[in-house]
Image (tube, rainbow, N blue to C red):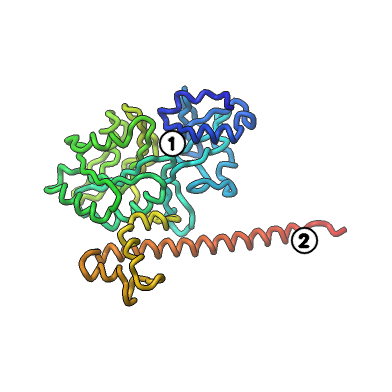
Amino acid sequence: MSDVDFSGLESLGWRPELAAAWDEGGYEDIFPGASPGRVGQVDRGACTVLLADRTVRAAPAPRVFRPEQPRLGGPGLATGDWVVVADDRVEEVLPRHSAFVRGSAGARTEAQIVAANVDTVFVVVALTGDQRLRRIERYLAVAWQSGAQPVVVLSKADLHPDPEAAADEVRGIAPGTSVHTISSHTGEGLEALRAYAGPGSTVALVGLSGVGKSTLVNALSGAERLSTQEVRGDFKGRHTTTHRELVPLPDGGLLVDTPGMRGLAVWDAEEGIDRAFSDIEELTGECQFRDCTHGAEPGCAVRGAVDEGELDEDRLGNWHKLRREQRMLELRQDARARAEDKQRIRTRARALKKRPHR
């Protein structure tokens, strides 16, 4: 049994399964003086870690980034991670129960962990300009894959002529997901959101720049913690948050604000896509052929629903698009794995050639 006092960590989201992982890992024997803590911010090659009684700056050990140490979302550090800290150094990352992960921008096939150990993901969308239902579907697919509960938050309701009608439209493409309209300016809807961020619970905010995430954090925390900027006249946002930060709330919960995402690439999100498009998945089971692609095959229940006006053609198109992206990701991952295997074989062969003959 551990000698570490875990009291004081509950307000940071500490769970019994983390205590079990701590005991099983034997970290106190491996790293004398070790303490568990939660990563509040990662920047400049170091991170801010919240301990039970203080906050420290700690540099991660190289082992934290080794790919042979599997964990949900992949190796590395993320805001929200629970870690083992000894002598102001992050030695290990404890198991995650959730991770919001996206594909990295650019040509590299890598995962980027946006936030870890989150209970609820607020997908924040402004009710100014175009709602972009297809974008919401994409965010929901990644949010469902994370292991957290997604919630759609339609912000700036005071600037929309009929926010409830807009919410109903979103509910039509968000099965199993709660949808809230809020205004950080008037306070409308904020109380409903506070219910998700009770003591020890963690909520992550994701969305484009300018949708009001930082303003929402300030409203929920009761302080001007994060800078905000006015949205331009064309309703396009400006970046305000430049890093991910774990923000404690007055009622005991925690928020993770994230920088605005211009793009959100899926990453191993097959199950999340199925959850976000559960209506299409249910129809798939009624198709005449088990390998139906929902194109021109006879007896396709999905195409039938489109023809009958029960399923939006654009929603089906987005489902196809996300599944194609997932398949392309899998192919790139396979190609990368094969290339890495070949490189290891070449490296070993060169090393053997250099060995003296006996």
Q: Which residue is mark 2?
A: 353
Left or right: 343 as drawn, with respect to 266:
right
Secondary structure, mark 1, is: strand
What residue lies at 47% left-to-right and 22% top-to-bottom? 53
Q: In front: 250, or 90?
A: 250
Residue 263 can be seen, yes or no: no
Quadrant housing the C terminus: bottom right
Q: Amino acid at mark 1?
A: Gln
User: Could you say where residue 201 lies in the image, as x and y percent from the top left?
Assistant: 37, 34
Task: Tell me the quarter of the picture where residue 256 sits.
Answer: top left
Q: Which residue is mark 1?
A: 41
Quadrant housing the N terminus: top right
User: Could you say where residue 345 lies in the image, as x and y percent from the top left?
Assistant: 68, 61
Tally of numbered tags:
2
Res 319 label: none
Q: In front: 351, or 285?
A: 285
User: Could you say where residue 228 lies in the image, as x and y percent from the top left?
Assistant: 27, 38
Q: In front: 268, or 77?
A: 268
What residue lies at 24% left-to-right and 37% top-to-bottom? 192
What residue lies at 50% left-to-right and 34% top-to-bottom? 18
Mark 2 surroundings within 10 Å by alpha-carbon count, few (fewer than 14), some (14 through 19), many (20 or more): few
